[in-house]
Image: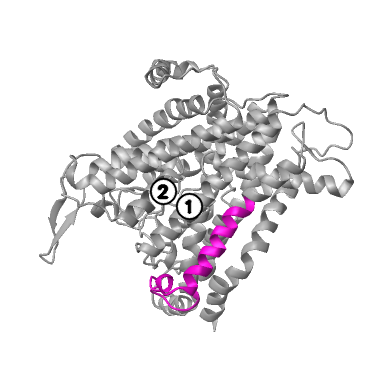
Amino acid sequence: MSWLQILFYLVVLVVLAKPLGGFMARIYEGEMPACARWLAPLERAIYRFCGLRADQEQGWKSYAGAMLAFNLLGLLAVYALQRLQGFLPLNPAHMAAVSPDSSFNTAVSFATNTNWQGYGGETTMSHLTQMLGLSVQNFVSAASGMAVLVALARGFTRKSSSTIGSFWVDLVRSTVYILLPLSIVLALVLVSQGVVQNFAAPVVAHTLQGAEQSISMGPAASQIAIKQLGTNGGGFFNVNSAHPLENPTAFSNLLEMLSILLISAGLCFTFGRLVKDKRQGLALLASMLIVLAPCIVMVQLFEQAGTHAQQLAGVELSAAADQPGGNMEGKELRLGIANSAIWSVATTAASNGSVNAMHDSFTPLGGLWPMWLIQLGEVIFGGVGSGLYGLLLFAIVAVFVAGLMVGRTPEYLGKKIGAFEMQWASFAILAPCVAVLFGTAVAVLLDAGRAGVANPGAHGFSEILYAFSSAGNNNGSAFAGLSANTPFFNIALGFAMLVGRYLVMLPVLAIAGALAAKKLVPAGPGTLPTHGLLFVLLLVSTVLLVGALTFIPALALGPIVEQLQMLH
């Protein structure tokens, strides 16, 4: 049944992604499908209110400036809401102001589509902060990533052009026609499954032992829908989608798992249509699935096997009663190991970070695969938009290496890849790696960093490495044994998030502008086909090689040595 669940999930994901990808392509091409035309007045109203012209395009520098200014405004708004929430309405639990360092970390986290949470959502944030601050950023940070991807696609298709589109138009269309309708539908379905959506104060329940328990209420379903669809991941509740009021049923669990990868998978089909060659999108999707599927299998195998102590206990239990084995620590009994394995890989392959099980409780090698997926740069599906443009950076590197092998000028999608594109692609790929390794080293060396570690030794190192991997690659999940809500970690992880987001976005836009200015080069006999199996294998090898060379030494100090210690 576990293997059937995994296979069912992957098949349904691909089946749903294809029509969604075609729909999104039509939106970005300006061909409004009939089912979306009713939203056109809202789009026009936004342009009028903001004084924008839909037909006015931007060069890459102007596009980048608009993106940075808009994201900075969102960051400042979320920071202000947290610091002032004690004086603002829709605060029935009377939450006090959030500390300055935690407010900074959270504001950066949601502006960068990371959604790392060093706090307990239901005990720290008012309803107003959750809705007006966090949920809004879930929409616009996701839309920013989608906009940059579309700009890069235009760079490949345009010739001798000085513009790559309008950031404002791409942002509005991503939000109005894609993210908003999908989120409304998903939120209503989640409410039907029992996810809470209200403005009530916490409810006090009496346990069987006679104690009182406070159960938080609030507008959860609306935030959960966009957190999954937009690969944001920040939960309304502290334990995220392991909470029964955030993920109550097997059906809600399936919908949320599909939502994590749905738009990222659909954008592969969108990209193929935008560049006028659907095979290109299929090659990129195949590259992602080739890495994703084995990782799910490996987590399932290691978690089903459990630890050495659990295996010994399982033998004794099985002899007395028909007791199945497996590592169930930190997992929901109602969901089981298979659904925990699928979710952990999907959320770390995507730039999502939501969880339905505690990754810190996985076996050493079971937890290695989610961490390693993050460290690959969040390009195996990745965040909406950001994952695919990150994979395209690796594609540029791959065709450049292939060109050197055969002594030809490398080409990709009809554009010659020169020194400028390679320099920026290399910079964008390596910047998050530097943030992760440098941040981890500093945290291990300083008392302030080591103070947050609850588990000494190899596992404590893994917790720190996971935290900076998650922040530097804009994922947001954690090995939750680390006490990260401290001034040191809030500030250090905040800067890692900024590096991982904007020092990738800016090079991507620079490459888009450079490619748009070039002429299209017709394919010749020496051109590497970028839609076949050979290119897929070359691209996957490039991604894995960069990830292995960068992080295997660090992983050897953490989960690998911990596995050896466990066996010993």
Whether residue 477 is visible: no
What residue does disc 1 label? 497
User: Image quarter for residue 265?
Assistant: top right
Tell which of 242 and 240 is nearer to you: 240
Residue at 42% of width from left, 35% of height from top?
A: 140
Q: Which mark is residue 108?
A: 2
Q: Is residue 441 magenta?
A: yes
Report the number of discs: 2
Crowding at dot 2, Cα within 10 Å, few <14 / some 14-19 / many 20+, comes out as: many
Question: Which amino acid type is shown beneath numbered disc 2?
Answer: Val
Indicate whether 115 appears above or below 199.
below
Residue 107, x across and y down, in percent: 37, 47
Give the magenta-colored segment's residue range.
429-458
The numbered dot on residue 403 is none
User: Which three-letter amino acid code belongs to the residue tagged 1?
Assistant: Met
Q: Position of residue 399 (x, y in %)?
A: 77, 44
The x and y percentages for residue 283 are: 69, 39
- Mark 1: secondary structure: helix
Question: What color scheme is it?
Answer: one colour
Q: Distance from label 1 to label 2 (Cα)?
A: 7 Å
